[in-house]
Image: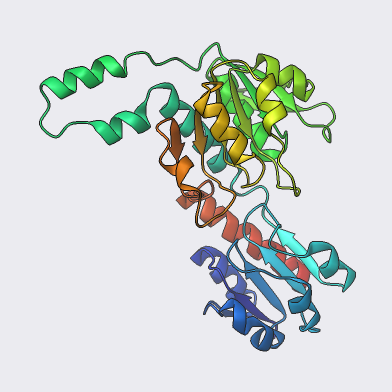
Amino acid sequence: MAKILINDGIHPTGQKMLEEAGYEVDCNKIAQDDLMARLPEYDAICVRSATKVREALITACPNLKVIGRGGVGLDNIDVDFAKSKGVAVINTPAASSRSVAELAFAHMLSVARFVYKSNRHMPKDGNTEFKALKKSYSKGFELSGKTLGVIGLGRIGQEAIKIALGMGMKVLGVDPYASDVTVDMQLGDTKVSVPVTKVTMDEMLAQADIITLHIPFTGAPVLSTSEFAKMKEGVVLVNASRGGTVDEAALLAALESDKVRAAGLDVFENEPTPRQELLQHPNVSCTPHIGASTAEAQENIGIELAEKLISQLS
């Protein structure tokens, strides 16, 4: 009987599927420092973002057959080395796409209507302060009619595009690795396929009113000082992808100069200790990396992870 270590948690539905398939499932977390000694007992390990599965750990576990990642990013796993040792690496790219895209739009709407600011500043007793705040936050904007630049046209980027089109936005997509992209939308009983307009990064930067990122971190920022210089004045930036994809020092400078009107951030360079200048900036809407943290996404992740583990271990 194969033994599976679920080190960063799994939805009960996924756990039940694995147990019903006949596997021994251990959901008792083992500390990172203790994994070298304990992981050789197992045939598979499932992690989220907390546990790191690096070359030394893989080498120490000759019986390891599968490394599962509940989520999209694989930056905490030495994927190429694992595969070179015959260890399968799986993730769940489809399960949380809608949840992440919806959070990106939550930030856009929060910024557009000053929700994040007014929530902080609403007075407890009303009267004069209430009236002053109403005046201060009465210059919001609608997303309808705005141009959204989408960096990354994978599953999450496509979900973001569906939402944008439904809200009446114009979409410009940037992705050097994607060919022609269409998104399928349900309009009542009718399904329609809408082609995505692909442009270069420079073309998008010059035209977008709002920019959202849906890409993995590949070792260097995609948006840094030179890219911010090419953006429209007063652009809004949303990042619900990975910390490091945006140069945070360059973002702060752009916020201070009003090149960037506001930013919505779910991810940061130094998680779990993001730089305070961003957390406390008056024009930044923040969330603590919760893009996939919905009840629906977590169950979907558990199901997809269980299905792939069963397939690999059977």
Q: Is residue 189 at least partly visible in the picture?
A: no
Residue 292: x and y, percent? 54, 49
Please tell me which residue lies in front, 163 or 36: 36
Quarter of the image holding residue 234?
top right
Please tell me which residue lies in front, 289 or 154: 289
Residue drawn at (68%, 84%), measured in percent from left and top?
A: 36
Residue drawn at (35%, 29%), measured in percent from left and top?
A: 115
Residue 73: x and y, percent? 68, 53
Q: What is the count of numbered marks?
A: 0
Residue drawn at (61%, 26%), measured in percent from left and top?
A: 211
- Would residue 137 appear left or right of 216 to someone viewing this image? left
Residue 141: x and y, percent? 44, 15
**Is 23 located above or below residue 138 in the figure?**
below
Residue 77: x and y, percent? 72, 64
**Is 40 located above or below residue 144 in the figure?**
below
Question: Which quadrant does the C terminus fall into?
Answer: bottom right
- Would residue 132 appear left or right of 87 to someone viewing this image? left
- What scheme was used to colour the molecule? rainbow
Residue drawn at (84%, 36%), measured in percent from left and top?
A: 177
**Is 180 located above or below residue 296 in the figure?**
above
Q: Residue furthest top?
A: 145
Q: Residue furthest right?
A: 84
Q: Is residue 86 at least partly visible in the picture?
A: yes
Question: Which quadrant does the N terminus fall into?
Answer: bottom right
